[in-house]
């Protein structure tokens, strides 16, 4: 069944720079109706937009998460793909919304709140087991970099599977067993991300970042039946900006040009999806749109958060963001539960356990010759790690491993 992309707007309070410039507030939001109105300083008639939610300067990240993001993340734990991304001009509050502050707790960002939500769900699951990995990448100057890799300067390549799923070759995947693991990985990635100071923002993100939590859910861990694989993309887009306002020159200007081109490509994709007449959707015009291909018009529950400035000197940028977000509301996705994926890691590990059983029985699986040699230590270590995350498999593997070791010690 088709489902519209959910879009909310989040207006931050006036910042010190805007106050010092004597700016006036031209943006008003009405949380009860989801309406947002913006008044042109040169025109008395305001423009009004309606969204799935509207949040003003007093709203907290906690309120935003509970109102609009909670159900999406809950769906990810059930087997749906999900994407949350923040869009808006430089200094609009995107990183604050996604990452937030550790104190006060009400302003913790959507990313750490998603960690809490997922592992709270895992902790109370009685008959279901989860295997969870995380990855973190950035798109900087139209190059993809692994923020958790050994050398983040090495650009990675995009590839496409036969089913049209786009993936990043050689992107590192990191097993996570709790919230602390996720936060450690996230903080490492944030430190590696490209940022710089501009006149609009003292710590401006100069890249688009995508933190992805990969979940595999097994409802019957003893034989691997009912496996579901899903992923949650948490996207912090770099801000759209004008050279005249940011004072960008040299490298900053090159970065801004690439950022604006990729955001323009994203806008073209949105326009083509809602047009109704477009035969071709220009996903291939940028790395960003290719990576978000499944999130816009595909098999994903998607939430867009438009982050806005209320100041009159940002009127043009704020109006552009509102129009961008209003178009995105009309995109239709077709999310479905991803059941029994053939390449699920859980299935690979169960197959490995069956292979070990065959070695003990000295009965090779069909078509495979088993040689009397000890299994690779790395394989054993990998499976033990996974089984620590899947307790119901752990004892099985431990018993098999000990029996294999004992057999190899026999004369």
Image (cartoon, rainbow, N blue to C red):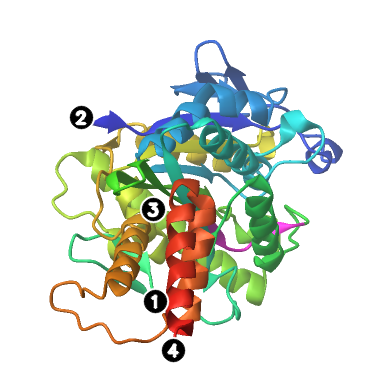
> Whole-percent x and y of residue 166?
31, 63
Of labels 1 and 4, the one closer to you: 4
> Whole-percent x and y of residue 57?
70, 26
Q: Say if mark 4 contacts mark 3, CB within 8 Å.
A: no
Q: Is residue 391 above or below residue 301?
A: below
- 10 Å neighbourhood of mark 1: few (<14), some, or many (≥20)? some
Q: Give the extent of the magenta segment.
A: 203-210
Q: Earlier in the sequence, mark 2 or mark 3?
A: 2
Q: Is residue 26 above or below residue 298?
A: above
Query: Spatial distance from mark 1 to mark 3, Cα to Cα?
Result: 19 Å
Q: Assign a secondary structure to mark 4.
A: loop
Q: Earlier in the sequence, mark 2 or mark 4?
A: 2
- 10 Å neighbourhood of mark 3: few (<14), some, or many (≥20)? many
Q: Earlier in the sequence, mark 1 or mark 2?
A: 2
Query: Spatial distance from mark 2 to mark 4, Cα to Cα?
Result: 63 Å
Q: Which mark is residue 157?
A: 1
Query: Spatial distance from mark 1 to mark 2, Cα to Cα?
Result: 33 Å
Q: Which mark is residue 56?
A: none
Q: Earlier in the sequence, mark 4 or mark 3?
A: 3
Which residue position holds label 4? 411
Name the residue: 19% across, 60% down: 163
Which residue position holds label 3? 266
Q: Earlier in the sequence, mark 1 or mark 4?
A: 1
């Amino acid at each position: 069944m088709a489902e519209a992309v959910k879009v909310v707007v989040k207006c931050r309070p006036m910042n010190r720079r805007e106050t010092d410039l004597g700016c006036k507030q031209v943006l008003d939001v009405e949380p009860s109706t989801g309406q947002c109105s913006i008044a042109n300083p040169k025109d008395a008639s305001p423009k009004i937009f309606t969204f799935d939610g509207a949040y003003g300067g007093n709203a907290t990240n906690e309120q935003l998460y509970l109102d609009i993001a909670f159900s999406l993340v809950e769906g990810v734990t059930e087997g749906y793909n999900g994407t949350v991304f923040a869009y808006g001009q430089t200094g609009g509050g995107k990183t604050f919304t996604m990452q937030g502050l550790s104190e006060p707790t009400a302003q913790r960002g959507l990313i750490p709140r998603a960690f809490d939500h997922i592992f709270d769900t895992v902790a109370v699951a009685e008959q279901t087991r989860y295997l969870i990995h995380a990855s973190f990448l950035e798109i900087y100057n139209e190059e993809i970099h692994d923020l958790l890799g050994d050398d983040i300067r090495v650009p990675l390549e995009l590839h496409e599977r036969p089913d049209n799923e786009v993936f990043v070759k050689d992107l590192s995947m990191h097993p996570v067993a709790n919230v602390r693991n996720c936060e450690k990985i996230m903080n490492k990635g944030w430190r590696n991300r490209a940022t710089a100071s501009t006149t609009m923002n003292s710590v401006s993100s100069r890249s688009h970042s995508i933190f992805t939590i990969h979940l595999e859910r097994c409802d019957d861990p003893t034989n691997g039946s009912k496996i579901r694989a899903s992923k949650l993309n948490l996207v912090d887009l770099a801000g759209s900006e004008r050279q005249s306002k940011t004072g960008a020159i040299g490298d900053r200007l090159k970065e801004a040009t690439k950022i604006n081109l990729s955001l323009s490509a994203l806008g073209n994709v949105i326009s083509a999806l809602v047009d109704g007449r477009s035969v071709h959707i220009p996903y291939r015009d940028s790395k960003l749109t290719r990576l978000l291909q499944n999130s816009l018009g595909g098999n994903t529950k998607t939430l867009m958060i438009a982050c806005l400035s209320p100041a009159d000197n940002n009127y043009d940028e704020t109006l552009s963001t509102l129009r961008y977000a209003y178009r995105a509301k009309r995109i239709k996705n077709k999310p479905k539960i991803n059941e029994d994926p053939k390449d699920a890691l859980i299935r690979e590990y169960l197959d490995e356990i069956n292979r070990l059983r065959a070695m003990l029985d000295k009965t090779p699986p069909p078509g495979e010759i088993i040689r009397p040699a000890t299994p690779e230590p790395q394989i054993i270590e990998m499976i033990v790690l996974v089984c620590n995350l899947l307790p119901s498999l752990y004892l099985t593997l431990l018993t098999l491993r000990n029996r294999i070791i004992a057999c190899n010690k026999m004369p």
